[in-house]
Image (tube, rainbow, N blue to C red):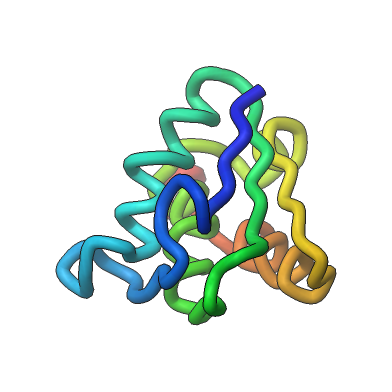
Amino acid sequence: MHDIAIARDFSEVPAGRFERDGPFSGEAFRERHLKPALSAGQAVVNLDGTEGYGSSFLEEAFGGLVRRGYFSASELHKRLKIVSRDQALVDEVWEYIDRAKNPSAN
């Protein structure tokens, strides 16, 4: 089980959707931290300790796992645990995952 704290392991100020938006974007987090951890097994992601999250960061980091075809939403429900003192934030992340569609999965 991989333990990832975004504030500790990535940035206290995550922002942006794509890497062209800056080094602490959702795409960068997904590709450098989230995808490798989940590819190796299971992961716990702690959202606490940052200055906040934009929806573009969260959707790209988490919804992008499904949209890119790395994992299905059902796989992520088994492999990924999201933790935060803010339950609404946790729920938001799961909404992005559950709404994401893999365009090649037909």
On the image, the x and y values in percent for residue 83 come to 76, 53
On the image, the x and y values in percent for residue 53 come to 53, 76
Number of numbered discs overlaid on the protein picture: 0
When asked about the image quadrant of residue 89, the answer is: bottom right
Figure quadrant of the N terminus:
top right
Q: Is residue 32 above or below residue 54?
A: above
Residue lying at 34% horizontally and 43% vertically, measured from the top left: 31
> 30 left or right of 40?
left
Front residue of 66/52: it is 52
Residue lying at 76% horizontally and 61% vertically, measured from the top left: 84
> 69 left or right of 28?
right
In this orientation, does residue 84 appear?
Answer: yes
Q: Is residue 90 above or below residue 78?
A: below
Residue lying at 42% horizontally and 40% vertically, measured from the top left: 33
On the image, the x and y values in percent for residue 76 come to 66, 40
Q: Is residue 59 above or below residue 63?
A: below
Extreme top residue here? 40
Extreme left residue here? 20
Residue lying at 33% horizontally and 65% vertically, measured from the top left: 25
In this orientation, does residue 99 appear?
Answer: no
Front residue of 21/65: it is 21
> 28 left or right of 13?
left
